[in-house]
Amino acid sequence: GDSVTQMEGPVTLSEEAFLTINCTYTATGYPSLFWYVQYPGEGLQLLLKATKADDKGSNKGFEATYRKETTSFHLEKGSVQVSDSAVYFCALSPNTGGFKTIFGAGTRLFVKA
Amino acid sequence: DARVTQTPRHKVTEMGQEVTMRCQPILGHNTVFWYRQTMMQGLELLAYFRNRAPLDDSGMPKDRFSAEMPDATLATLKIQPSEPRDSAVYFCASVPGQGYNEQFFGPGTRLTVL
């Protein structure tokens, strides 16, 4: 079945450091790919998405590129801030009309001032 | 600013008691999901509905959990009887449908069963 694997956390970085969180997926067909972010005490919210191969999703300085050849969707940010501390979830949704989403286990990011 | 709302935000109860959690999806969204989040298991899908009809509840313990959608503006998740292992944060999420598959999450209900 479809699945998402993302790097284990926690990831601890200093402010202004470069961030990469790895995500790979297994799916039949051509799913949509997402990154969601969860801040403490809140629900998940969409950070960015890509719907087809080679698409780049971007938002708030974060970006990820849909790589079908490596089945990956790694999240990157050039310079993290303390306010980026959160849990990040990679996810996929098969484009079969069901809208069901498969989430990764989440990666906790701590950014130190 | 349309949002998914959930009530209550926090619930503390004793083992054996009935717990009902409510969710109001964003108006016009036709698909509603219930998730449970714990440190050990992460985010688990419990059940979901399309146009108020249950599509999949295979993630839900059938003997004690039930999920319904009495109308388009209300989804409920009930646990009877509750057990300490049910302690978790329960999230509701809705999806617009019409080919748009981003999930919009509510703030969650934090349940503690003593």
Image (cartoon, helix red, strand yellow):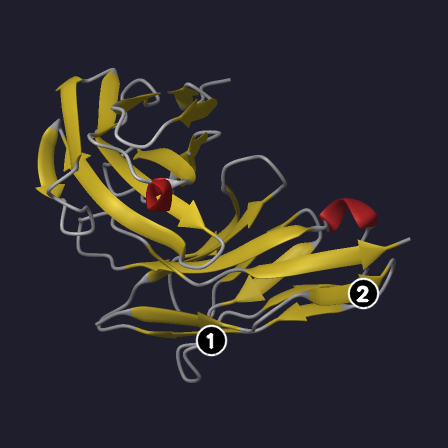
Is disc 2 placed on a helix, strand or loop?
strand
Is disc 1 placed on a helix, strand or loop?
loop
Mark 2, other Cα within 10 Å: few <14 / some 14–19 / many ≥20: some
* Quadrant (top left/top right/bottom left/bottom right) for the N terminus of chain A: bottom left
**Residue A74, x across and y down, in percent:** 56, 70
Q: Which residue is mark 1?
A: A72
**Residue B49, x across and y down, in percent:** 16, 35
Q: Which residue is mark 2?
A: A13
Are labels 2 and 1 assigned to the same chain? yes
Which is more N-terminal, label 1 or label 2?
A: 2
Residue A69 vs residue A103, the one in the foreground: A103
Residue shown at the point (31%, 17%) measured from the top left = B27
**Residue A9, x across and y down, in percent:** 62, 68
Residue B20 lies in quadrant:
top left
User: In screen coordinates, is A55 left or right of B14?
Assistant: right
Q: Chain of mark 1?
A: A
